[in-house]
Image (cartoon, rainbow, N blue to C red):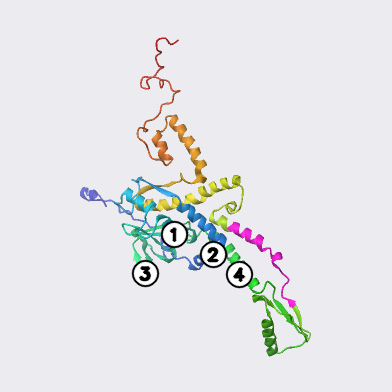
Amino acid sequence: MAWWDKILGREVAEVEEKLNPAQSYYANTTEPSREFTFKYEKAYEQLEIVNRGVNLIVDDCAEITTTVGPQIPSIQSIQKGLKRSRLDILLNKEPNPFQDISTFKRNLITDYVIDGNIFVYYDGVHLYHLPAEKVTIHADSETYIEKFTFNDINYKPSEIIHIKENSFYSIYRGTSRLKPALRTIILMQNMRQFQDNFFKNGAVPGLVLKSPNTLSEKIKERMIQSWTIRYRPDSGGRRPLILDGGIEIDQISNTNFRELDFQHAILENEKIILKALGIPPILMDSGNNANIRPNMRMYYLETILPIVKKLHFGLERYFGFELKENVTDVPALQPEMRDQSQYYTALVNGGIISPNEAREHLGFDTIEGQDDLRVPANIAGSAANPDEGGRPESEEGDS
């Protein structure tokens, strides 16, 4: 009940604040299995295509700078009192005394792609990256999030900027972008292990020693030791062997690498992983420029910019300032910029927006004296006095 209702003696029914209906359920399921995240990290370290794909996204996202705009009146920011100029330094130059902005951004985006979460600690002065795999979210059925924990240190929700990837299972933690390709990643790791074991065995299949006689376990063990000493495929040693007593050699399997077609399987599996990351496979191949340019543009529009925008949305809500992506230095988006320039030029010449408004939309600074609307030359009166209208008076001597 509001204070003015109490003064007037009016009784107003108390409105019950309802919680998210699913919050009590999700409060007990905040921590995903570390087993899967561990697999993604191992894949990043061991599989070239995963490492290259993740690094491509990380590098391209980190190179996009942030334009800090005015405060957003409709947002109730978590942190207040920060100056616009100071936020620009934090997001474009120096987030903290220990990292440059490029390293800082790369840490954030790497966590976002591999773990599905970004955690940033703001101490009131600087921004610090917290490794996502070491951050624990303590959910609460009433307050949404009670606290965050990192290295046995508790942080208030107001101290942490948490940006998460889409997730079907949790409203608290995001999902790795590699999850749709988890089966393929495990398959490629198994193929790699098979190849390693094959070549450790001297690139020959397993062998079976056949004897027409029944041998005791002691004799079998002695024959295996003798065979191992004389025939060392792992070190390239293949001494001539003389087999007696009716001993025969046979292969366990006649399958060879050519029949398995590992190369084709690897290429197809790499395409699946790249698609999960949102990277057109042609960008990793040696295609011609005509094919690469449209795919590069699509890659930026559908993969890179959405990631950067999501990062900016989280920072906007936390600090309350409008943040935009500066893509003027991205070559792949320059055709888009050219189309936008033609579009805004038409709006300016049509008297719909001012030149400075067009410059703001294109990401450029405004200039003095360009805030007025232009009156098109084909509108009656524009050639004379726009306030009076009509055609201009003809000068003497004009026919």
Judged by depth in the image, the label closer to the viewer, 1 or 3, is 1
Q: Position of residue 176 (x, y in %)?
A: 50, 60
Q: Which is more toward the observer, 200 or 134?
A: 200
Q: Position of residue 318 (x, y in %)?
A: 36, 53
- The residue indicated by pointer 1 is 107
Amino acid bearing label 1: Asn
Q: Earlier in the sequence, mark 1 or mark 3?
A: 1
Amino acid bearing label 2: Ala
Judged by depth in the image, the label closer to the viewer, 3 or 2, is 2
Quarter of the image where one finds residue 395: top left
Residue 202 appears in view: yes
- The residue indicated by pointer 4 is 193
Residue 171 appears in view: no
Q: Is residue 129 above or below residue 370?
A: below
> Alpha carbon of mark 2 to alpha carbon of mark 4: how far?
13 Å
Q: Is residue 180 left or right of residue 128?
A: right
Q: Earlier in the sequence, mark 3 or mark 2?
A: 2
Q: Is residue 132 above or below residue 4?
A: below
Q: Quadrant of the C terminus?
A: top left
Q: Earlier in the sequence, mark 2 or mark 4?
A: 2
Quarter of the image where one finds residue 256: bottom right
Q: Secondary structure at mark 1?
A: helix
> Alpha carbon of mark 1 to alpha carbon of mark 4: how far?
30 Å
Q: Quick one: label 2, few (<14), some, or many (20+) residues within 10 Å? A: many
Q: Which residue is at 47% across, 37% downward?
A: 341
Prevailing secondary structure of the magenta residues: helix
Judged by depth in the image, the label closer to the viewer, 4 or 3, is 4
Q: Secondary structure at mark 3?
A: loop
Q: Which is more toward the observer, 212 or 165?
A: 212
Q: Quick one: label 3, few (<14), some, or many (20+) residues within 10 Å? A: few
> Alpha carbon of mark 1 to alpha carbon of mark 2: how far?
17 Å
